[in-house]
Amino acid sequence: MSISLLLEMAQDAGPDRTAIVDDELRLTTSRLSALADGGAGLIAAAGAGHVAYVGTGGALLPLLLFASARAAIPLTPLNYRLSADGLRALLDRLPDPLVIVDDEYRDAVGDRYRTMSSAEFLTSAETAEPAAEFADPDAVGVVLFTSGTTSRPKAVELTHANLTSYITGTVEFSSAEPDDAALICVPPYHIAGVSAALSNLYAGRKMVYLRHFDAQKWVELVAGEGVTSATVVPTMLDRIVTVLQTQNVTLPTLRTLAYGGSKVPLPLVRTALSLLPDVGFVNAYGLTETSSTIAVLTPDDHRAALAASDDAALRRLGSVGQPVPGIEVEIRADDGTVLGAGEPGELYVRGEQVSGKYTDIGSVLDANGWFPTKDVAYLDAEGYLFIGGRSDDTIIRGGENIAPAEIEDVLVEHPHVRDCAVVGADDPQWGQIIVAVVVARDGATPDAEELRSFVRSQLRGSRTPDRVVFRDELPTNATGKVLRREIVSELNQHRTPEQPAATQGAPA
Amino acid sequence: MIKNGTRLQSQVCDTQVIVVRSADSLDDLRIGGAPAVPIGDEVDANLALDEALADGNLMGKRYVDDAGAEVLVTKAGKGTISIGSTPLALKEAKPLPASD
């Protein structure tokens, strides 16, 4: 099945429905479809091997997704925040691309490639000779580069079958109420941007785009467009909560608020829940390689965890919920043994939405189709999934494996801590030591020793941070992922001689 | 066995489906009593909707049989979707909250 069919069906069900709102631009489903046909004609006429998009998205993303699909050519939206060199390095890896580019990034792209401005694409698509091919389901529809926070960006290949099985497996067609509207402010080059465009269209939900996130504008748009659902990354949630706390505004139309992209500190979740008691919160977990969401903590799960009296149920507020239909999960030990409830190991997933395939690398699925997520995780007795961070981030201190998330979850509950990241810094004696990088709450001046005691009182002694350092903010990428490598390399360059780590925090 | 992703149409009503999960049983897929054919193929004008298999189907819904076959209705019509004369069952989906 080609993703093109999703638009075809949406158009059949409601041709005159407003599908997209992007500032002044409003498109009905049939107008979107007509533009996608014209856009496909432009792409086919260019004879390109690939379509690349450099820009801030909005209506351009769904339009290019369907135009490329109808030309049966893969699309790659790129991170417009990259440097000119960074952009060109990725464009060079795409076969004979036609680059659609927002004007402000035209210089960064340069003149090495065939380019067309986004505005020109939109205008020309109106009058172009339409084309509409039906792509093979096993053909690649979208190629996304991973953020490359740990290594060279990898090009993840998502087939039409991957993407459509995610949509048809998790979204009921035309299930949205006539007035439903989704506010989309995730970047176009992120899998969440791709899945938002497909799933909301298929559900029949108006898509309201906010190209540059601003908490104040976000709150105003919710009211102005009667937004009923939205997805945010942790940093966005944090800023929205601040706006809600400092101004006396409510969000009466909002029914569901999904958060994901990276781990959201639990105190922030609790604050958001208490500020928005009528909103259903959704924690969505997924990877680029899995065509977006593979597990969901539903609004009912959130309410049950908040009202719970036993520890196991309370803890589920910090879980990513249960796998979506069509996804199987397994937790495996290093030797491949499948682990039981409560035992942490590496998360493996399987399902039709899972690609696990990279350009130039090939498929990393095992013989039975399982994809290694590289995430440390465990399942509780009820099958709720808990994510403990990337396995690459595991700290090995004196031979003991320590998951940073375990310590972060404790630290972030301290009343003086706004945010934190726990990392392993090089150490001659222990190999690595535990360093807690802490962002203090406004007006608070937490004491390093007190924070160490706070952790020691709740976790085994070997989990006590050897050092606590303070920062005004943590380095993150656009989707809120903490750039741990950056923190570690900075720490390794600036060892504080007055605080020789090896004399502190011997394992208990 | 028919390939996943194959699009089929009824010969006797407006129904179009896409094969989500194939099984051998789909070789005898009928809509409105008449064999389903690939979209774009010629339809037999002499065929008529079987009144016993005219309960219709719903746009965007998935239909399944006991053998694991699954089709998605991409255009609704008057015919019942069946394997032989046994109607496929509507696949009930547990609604998920909007997460994108």
Image (cartoon, coloured by chain):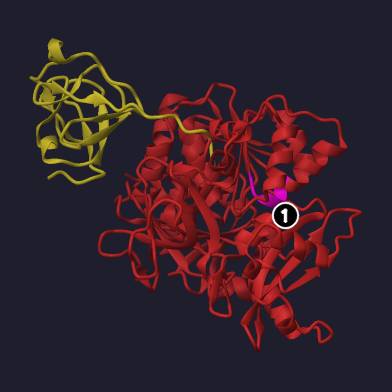
Residue A141 vertical placement versus B20 (above, below): below
Asked whether residue A48 appears in the rendered view, the answer is no
Q: Locate residue A257, reporting x and y percent.
A: 63, 36
Per the picture, the main secondary structure of the magenta-coloured stretch is helix
Q: Quarter-wise, where is residue B10 in the image? A: top left
Chain to which mark 1 belongs? A
Q: Which residue is painted at 46% across and 53% down in the image?
A: A342
Quadrant of image for the C terminus of chain A: bottom right
Q: Is residue A236 magenta?
A: yes
The chain letter corresponding to red is: A
Instruction: Give residue A59's quadrant in the image.
Output: top right
User: Which residues lie in the magenta part?
Assistant: A232-237
Q: Which chain is yellow?
A: B
Q: Is residue A375 left or right of residue B21?
A: right
Whether residue A304 is in magenta: the answer is no
User: What residue is rendered at 23% in x and 45% in y?
Assistant: B4
Q: Which residue is at 23% across, 42% downward?
A: B6
> Which type of secondary structure does the marked residue at label 1 adopt?
loop
Residue tagged 1: A412
Where's residue A445, x and y in %? Answer: 89, 60
- Foreground pick, A2 / A312: A312
User: Seen from this angle, which residue lies furthest bottom?
Assistant: A428
Report crowding for label 1: few under 14, some 14 to 19, many 20 or more residues within 10 A (C-alpha).
many
- Looking at the image, the residue that sits furthest to the right is A443
Q: Answer above or below: position of A72 versus A337.
A: above
Q: In the rendered view, does A490 fall on the left or right side of A168?
A: right
Image x and y of residue A183, in percent: 64, 38
The quadrant in which the N terminus of chain A is found is top left
Residue type beneath disc 1: Val
Which one is in front, A199 or A63? A199
